[in-house]
Image (cartoon, rainbow, N blue to C red):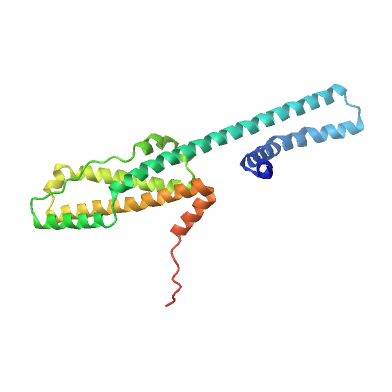
Amino acid sequence: MFRAILNLFLGEEARIARVVIVQFFVTIALPVAVLLGIPLLIASVSIDLDPRLWQALIAGLVITTGWLTTAIFNELARTRTKSERLRDYHKAIYAEIGTTLASLWDEGRSEAYAAATVARMRDEADFVPFIPRESHDHIYDAILDEIDVLPRQTIDIIVAYYSLIKSISALADDMRGERFLTLPKERQIAVYEDYSEMRRQAFAFGQHALALILAFASGGAEAAQALKDQVNTPAVDRSGP
């Protein structure tokens, strides 16, 4: 009960209400008070103002209160809608990345497979590995127009991950084409090694994206930012020179 009351006055919705009220007073109430309120106050001291003027002022105050209340509720509704979309997008992206990682890279096995493929390409002049066409970005493409909903703590790694996924798909198309077959064998091997390394990097990006999304869901922006800073900050060598 106490926590609910505390959240009512100190929670996110209370913060939004305070922001709207401050904006109202700074941009509307204060200028009006300076331009009209002070002259009216001075005039009321020296002359008797018509009671109807005071009635109009009171009516204006009531109207202003109603407008302010409406603005607060509209802002709260907008914030709730954005928060719901953020949660939905995070869940969808988390699911898409999570189901993709296993097919992108398998620690240990993928390295061995890539090395064996390169060795076979060197040993067999006619061997060209079959590269399947994969698509792992349907959900991302669907929400791309509203990608700005994502918070800054997760948007960078998500965009980086999907950019790499699209690059992998484009390279796979090139490797399936006739031009790849005409390349010298060493060039084919170099392209395949790049392709394999891109998949490994996408796997790492995907793991990091999942960790940040999970941190944001469980601890909010602060937890996600702390994890992001931890990953981005190089480890300090405490052993000395």
Whole-percent x, y for residue 91 in the image: 44, 40
**Residue positioned most to the front:** 1
**Residue at horizontal 41%, vertical 48%?**
210
**Residue at horizontal 83%, vertical 31%?**
40
Whole-percent x, y for residue 6 in the image: 68, 44
**Residue positioned most to the left:** 125
Between 97 and 68, the residue placed more toward the observer is 97
- Asked if 150 appears above or below 196 in the picture, the reply is above
**Residue at horizontal 12%, vertical 46%?**
181
**Residue at horizontal 61%, vertical 31%?**
74
184 vs 60, left or right, is left
Q: In the rendered picture of this protein, how many numbered marks are placed on residues? A: 0
Quarter containing the N terminus: top right
Whole-percent x, y for residue 159 in the image: 39, 45
Q: Quadrant of residue 107?
A: bottom left
147 vs 52, left or right, is left
- Asked if 196 appears above or below 24 in the picture, the reply is below
- Asked if 233 appears above or below 158 in the picture, the reply is below
Whole-percent x, y for residue 161 in the image: 36, 47
